[in-house]
Amino acid sequence: MDLPVMPPVKPMLAKSVARIPPGMQYEAKWDGFRAIVFRDGAEVELGSRTGKPLTRYFPELVEALKQRVPERCVLDGEIVIARDGRLDFDALTERIHPADSRVRTLAERTPASFVAFDLLALADESLLDVVLSDRRALLARALSDVTAPVHLAPATTDPAVAGRWFEQYEGAGLDGVIAKPLASPYLQDQRAMYKIKHERTADVVVAGYRFHKSGPVVGSLLLGLYDGQGVLQHVGVSAAFAMKRRAELVEELEPLRMDDVSGHPWAAWAEEAAHETARLPGAPSRWSGRKDLSWVPLRPERVCEVAYDHMENGARFRHTARFRRWRPDRTPETCTYAQLEEPVRYDLDAILGG
């Protein structure tokens, strides 16, 4: 492979803002795997955000890209999987599997798509120093006749359109809106773009915690919600605390600490088979590797309010929730999935087809 921009490339990043800023290019924020596509003739490589290759996990995309994108190019975009008209991040994570046979089976069962939103090189020219407005024009021209499973991400300079996308596209599993300065070159590994994400709040049960990697202070609180059968399901964690607050939380939660986990709703967390029928903390994961997933069980009696962006498959928080306050006025039994706001469904095909 001999391209004007060679792997690894660290993607340009975005910082969170509360509102859609004016005077920029706007795109939907895709909920998938960020990927840089390098194509040089018959050679195709998919680079991840960390620089590690994703190529072996998506063989169907490699073949599709060979047929649909310029012979020599470098594209920035997102690998996604769609099911029933919306993005499915769970299906995407299943693709990161050590067994080649499993990867190929899933490639047939749940094929991935690639949504391109930037062009970093074309033919023998690097476009890293070219401003976004010109890169977008070149990208639109290069992918003008592209067909599924490769897509050109919709973009607009109208903030009113971006506002409608923000409200509607969540129903298709998208994550918000990205705003990009039109005069910006491609700035690797810099937060030079802006992301506007949905934020909601929920009252959840604190049923345990993990220690911080630095020592015996709280690293993250383990959060639960009761389902329709009265079972406390693990829905995620809250982890952003100042170090002083982490130490205070250990003392604050000590009266709830359980020496015997057998009476805890998540007592079966260490049994791998149990994770097939319930959402429990410490589930085996190819992402966690050798990471210590042990946790301290607490009597599930305290309720806190957290902020979250959206739910993954309606079951758990897609990202780490943000602690807002304790809710002594709420009882754990009232913390159910029923309180969560469901976005109005929106057909993903209507986005990619547009």
Image (spheres, rainbow, N blue to C red):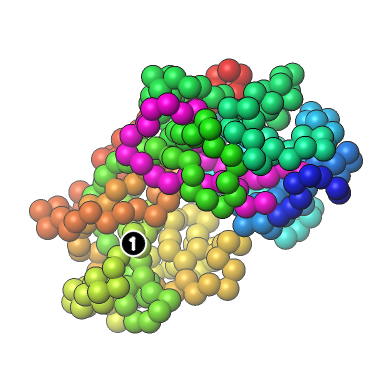
Q: Residue 313 location in percent, x, y?
A: 46, 41
Q: Quadrant of the C terminus?
A: top right
Q: Is residue 140 left or right of residue 84?
A: right
- Report which quarter residue 115 is drawn in: top right
Question: What's the magenta region?
Answer: 9-38
Q: Is residue 31 visible?
A: yes
Q: Residue 187 location in percent, x, y?
A: 58, 46
- Which residue is at 29% across, 41% downward? 200
Q: Is residue 100 left or right of residue 296?
A: right
| Local secondary structure at mark 1 | loop
Residue at the right extreme, as displayed:
42
Q: 125 or 16: which is nearer to us?
A: 125
Residue at the left extreme, as displayed:
329
Q: Residue 137 location in percent, x, y?
A: 65, 23
Q: Is residue 282 above or below residue 178?
A: below
The residue tagged 1 is 240
Q: Is residue 70 left or right of residue 339?
A: right
Query: Was residue 17 drawn as part of the magenta stretch in this picture?
Result: yes
Q: 125 or 103: which is nearer to us?
A: 125
